[in-house]
Image (cartoon, rainbow, N blue to C red):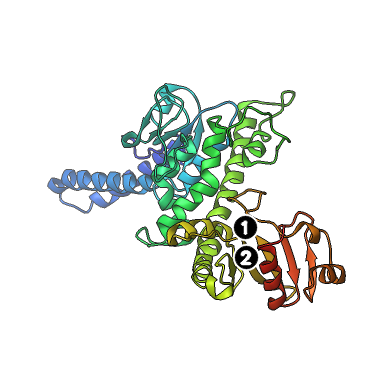
């Protein structure tokens, strides 16, 4: 009879045998105080109770396992493993790296290997022919293994990170924003989808992305690449991707989302700032750009916002910032006048005719003034001057 069954984990079977032997000796001593006819019943009951008790205790120690592929690793499965470990079901699960079907079939969940996508059996691969899963909600990028895990477990992971119940009204907003700002790029890179439609080569090489940094954790061609080394390096990749994902979730949930209220208020008050309705004033500085694009659509703003005004909390001076044509773009809807760019202080004030000027950036996307009245005048002149 096997009293200990933890499938290759911490408890040695010899410990189980020693405990079994000790229990049997104890039962034997106790049985001498019972009538002869009761001894068989007593022994059967005690052994049954002991077996059940040991099964319950050892069952608590059974470790669930996440299966993924061996060999070189990538950002998507590293992040997918980290996210799974943040769920209640797979918390602190063991990660098994293999391509052997006989091993993978016994895993509790498998990602990025196996050629199967089946939510009901917790198989999440995206390499098989015909796979075309996307997140939905207007996002049409083909999912990687990270995207698949996020699609099915992302809300729970975010709720656990932020300490929110699963029915919290803000959870869906954070879920979609984290996909937009973090997960979608992982999906696109892993599936070889260009960030822009162009046959031209990139103007520069960027080797600082999350995927690139994960790739650099793989052993170099002339380094030890044994399975043990690869496994340890993969665990580093899991922690790297997880740390950055967690930072992204906390930023969206605890900084980006609260700022939405302030940007909405600024948009609704835009005509009080300037009759054009194309200048907004933030009463409290907060991340505003992405809220602005979404809220313009949501509120049906007809004339696009061109400049945002806010006070710099550290320097206690006012800033004017041009609104770019879209998130992540360096092109502005309208820049500050060309004649002002690169000038500072008295020289800028004299040329512009506006007292208190501090600077105008050489690219014309941002400037400053000592007062709100001064920065507002800079914005108003920028509406008409080229």
Q: Is residue 304 above or below residue 243?
A: below
Q: Residue at left 71%, top 57%?
A: 365
Q: Relative to the observer, which residue lies in front, 210 or 331?
A: 331
From this view, report whether residue 165 is shown above or below residue 193: below
**Outermost residue toward the left in this view:** 37
Say left or right for 152 vs 220. left
Q: Nearer the viewer, residue 101 or 139?
A: 139
For label 1, count other residues whose C-alpha is less than 10 Å away and answer few (under 14), some (14-19) or many (20+): many
Q: Which mark is residue 308?
A: 2
For the point 67% across and 62% down, which residue is it?
A: 384
User: What percent of the width, then of the height, locates residue 344?
Assistant: 84, 66
Quarter of the figure with residue 117:
top left
Residue 333 location, x and y as percent? 62, 54
Q: Residue at x 66, y 68 (%)?
A: 380
In the rendered picture of this protein, how many numbered marks are placed on residues?
A: 2
Q: Secondary structure at mark 1?
A: loop
SS at circle 2: strand
Instruction: Please give left or right for residue 198 compared with residue 116 in the image.
Output: right
108 lies left or right of 213: left
Q: Looking at the rendering, in which quadrant would you find the C terminus?
A: bottom right
Q: Quadrant of the N terminus?
A: top left
The reply to whether residue 217 is in sight is yes
Q: Residues within 10 Å of mark 2 (few under 14, many from 20)?
A: many
Measured as percent of width and height from the top left, residue 324 is found at 62, 53
Q: According to the image, label 1 marks what residue?
A: 323
Alpha carbon separation for disc pair 1 and 2: 7 Å
Position of residue 300 relative to residue 241, above or below, is: below
Q: Residue at x 46, y 41 (%)?
A: 11
Residue 351: name its quadrant. bottom right
Marks 1,2: beta carbons within 8 A:
yes
């Amino acid at each position: 009879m096997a009293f200990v069954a933890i499938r290759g984990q911490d408890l040695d079977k010899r410990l189980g045998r020693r405990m079994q032997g000790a229990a049997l000796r104890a039962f034997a001593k106790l049985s001498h105080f019972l009538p002869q006819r009761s001894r068989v019943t007593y022994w059967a009951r005690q052994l049954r109770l002991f077996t059940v008790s040991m099964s319950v205790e050892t069952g608590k120690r059974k470790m669930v396992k996440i299966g993924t592929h061996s060999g070189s690793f990538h950002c998507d499965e590293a992040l997918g493993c980290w996210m799974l470990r943040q769920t209640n079901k797979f918390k602190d699960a063991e990660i098994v790296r293999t391509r052997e079907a006989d091993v993978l079939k016994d895993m509790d969940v498998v990602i990025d290997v196996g050629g199967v996508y089946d939510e009901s059996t917790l198989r999440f691969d995206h390499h098989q022919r015909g796979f075309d899963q996307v997140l939905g909600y207007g996002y049409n990028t083909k999912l990687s293994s990270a995207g698949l895990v996020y699609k099915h477990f992302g809300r729970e992971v975010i709720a656990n990170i932020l300490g929110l119940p699963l029915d919290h009204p803000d959870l869906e907003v954070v879920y979609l924003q984290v996909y937009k700002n973090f997960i979608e790029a992982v999906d696109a890179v892993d599936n070889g989808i260009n960030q822009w439609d162009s046959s031209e080569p990139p103007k520069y090489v960027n080797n600082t992305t999350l995927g690139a940094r994960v790739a650099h954790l793989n052993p170099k061609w002339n380094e030890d690449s044994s399975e043990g080394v690869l496994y340890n390096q993969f665990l580093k990749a899991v922690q790297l991707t997880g740390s950055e994902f967690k930072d992204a979730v906390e930023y969206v949930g605890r900084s980006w989302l609260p700022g939405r209220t302030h940007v909405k208020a600024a948009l609704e008050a835009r005509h009080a700032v300037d009759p054009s309705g194309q200048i907004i004033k933030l009463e409290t500085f907060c991340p505003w750009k992405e809220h602005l694009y979404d809220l313009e659509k949501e509120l049906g703003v007809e004339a696009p916002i061109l400049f945002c005004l806010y006070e710099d909390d550290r320097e206690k001076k006012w800033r004017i910032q041009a609104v770019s044509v879209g998130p992540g773009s360096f092109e502005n809807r309208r820049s500050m006048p060309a004649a002002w760019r690169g000038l500072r202080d008295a020289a800028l004030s004299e040329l512009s005719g506006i007292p208190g000027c501090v600077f105008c950036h050489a690219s014309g996307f941002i400037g400053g003034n000592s007062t709100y009245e001064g920065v507002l005048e800079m914005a108003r002149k920028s509406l008409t001057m080229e």
